[in-house]
Amino acid sequence: DQQVKQNSPSLSVQEGRISILNCDYTNSMFDYFLWYKKYPAEGPTFLISISSIKDKNEDGRFTVFLNKSAKHLSLHIVPSQPGDSAVYFCAASADGSGNTGKLIFGQGTTLQVKP
Amino acid sequence: DVKVTQSSRYLVKRTGEKVFLECVQDMDHENMFWYRQDPGLGLRLIYFSYDVKMKEKGDIPEGYSVSREKKERFSLILESASTNQTSMYLCASTATSGITGGEQFFGPGTRLTVL
């Protein structure tokens, strides 16, 4: 039962253009969403997050949009740079986690930004 | 600077061997996690611990056990390694706070190969 889904295994964009990574979820109890970035042979690093009480959060070139009615979130990277090439994981948590910090991760999307 | 370290970056073991993966964090975090990452499957939670000597099963605990004798250290044990446990193993930690689903900090990962 995949509660967090990233249906696109890979995405290729040209440098300078917009990258849009998508994530869908099924559990309406999720109240906090995060995006992580992972380079090969390294651990994931936190990128940006959004609370369910918001519909948008922006940090520099990165913006996350949340559509609760559609149970969908997306990460926009503008402009995309070759250094953004990595695997991106969407993650979610529910209040019922009891502050254990438990996250549910999606399958990941591999982004390639071409120079 | 926050830090999560894992005892080995690469490990090769034989089928049937007992394998220990060690994780240490220096952030005084209450919660620690073990994941495995496989292509197309994302990060799957094996076990987590929310306090010393406390542990809970994640989504795929079969074939694994854990130990948390000290707050900063969380060990993953493969009692009898099998080839289907060949994977990237990632350790993470996070604080228990008023913020649900706070950021998890990851170690660099251990690439385990079981022959």
Image: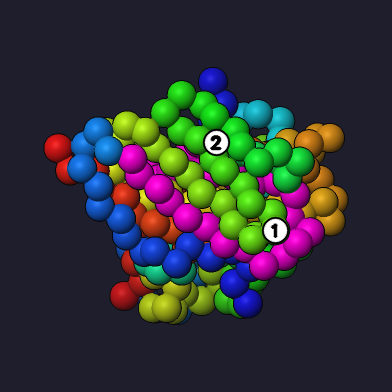
Q: According to the image, label 1 marks what residue?
A: A69
- Residue sticking out furthest to the left: A115
Who comes first in sequence, dot 1 or dot 2?
2
Say whether residue B67 is magenta: no
Q: Chain of mark 2?
A: A
Amino acid marked by disc 1: Ser
Q: According to the image, label 2 marks what residue?
A: A48
Callout 2 secondary element: strand
Say whether residue A45 is magenta: yes
Q: Residue at x 78, y 36 (%)?
A: B99
Q: Quadrant of the N terminus of chain B?
A: top right
The image shows residue A115, relative to residue A32, as above or below, that is above
Q: Quadrant of the C terminus of chain B?
A: bottom left
The image shows residue A17, relative to residue B85, as above or below, that is above
Tell which of A104 and B111 is nearer to you: A104
| Residue A53 visible in the picture | yes
Q: Position of residue B105 (x, y in %)?
A: 57, 38
Q: Residue at x 62, y 29 (%)?
A: B26
Disc number placed over residue B97 in the picture, else none:
none
**Magenta segment range?**
A18-47
Q: Chain of mark 1?
A: A
Magenta span: chief secondary structure: strand
Is B25 on the left or on the right of A16, as rendered? Answer: right
